[in-house]
Amino acid sequence: MIFGKAISIFASRNLEVKTLTTYQRELINSKRITQIYLDQISSRSIGVGLVQLIVGRESQALKLVRELMERTKAKIVDPTEKQIIIELVESVLVRTYALNLQKLSGREFEGEALNWGCAPNPL
């Protein structure tokens, strides 16, 4: 019999579920569920940065966006890939934080995108 594995992702350890059912506790104890805490990951990957942006606080959003832009600028060569990442970041900001990118540092965002050789899509 093959048992599946799963990952539960928490922004931080204090958001983890405190009261588990017997079944949930058994899944964790058997290592079929791996718990990941984003605030404890030292990875500088773009993917982890996007997840941190999604679950992070609105007050940290601009800092996380700047870090993602720097990582993308340093690691991604293909302009199409850069454009996809820009669009993902825009989408996360608009949907997660309901931010108006034109009012909130939209010029800065566009400037970074132009530095990458990409033009952001108008909202």
Image: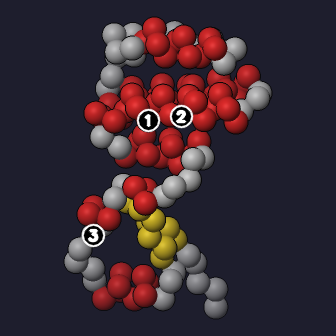
**Contact? badges 3 and 1 (CB < 8 Å):** no
Give the vertical position of 64 relative to 109 (above or below): below
What x and y, as percent, mark residue 66?
48, 28
Q: Residue at x 54, y 11 (%)?
A: 111
N-terminal label among 2 and 3: 3
Label 3: how many Cα within 10 Å (few below 14, some 14–19, many 20+): few
CA–CA distance between discs 2 and 3? 29 Å
Give the vertical position of 32 relative to 9 (above or below): below
Q: Secondary structure at mark 1?
A: helix
Which amino acid type is marked by label 3?
Answer: Val
Name which quarter of the figure residue 113 lies in: top right
CA–CA distance between discs 3 and 1? 26 Å
Q: Which residue is mark 1?
A: 64
Q: Which residue is mark 2?
A: 68
Q: Quadrant of the N terminus?
A: bottom right
Q: Secondary structure at mark 2?
A: helix
Q: Which residue is mark 3?
A: 17
Label 2: how many Cα within 10 Å (few below 14, some 14–19, many 20+): many
Q: Residue at x 51, y 43 (%)?
A: 49
Task: Give residue 88's mark.
Answer: none
N-terminal label among 3 and 1: 3
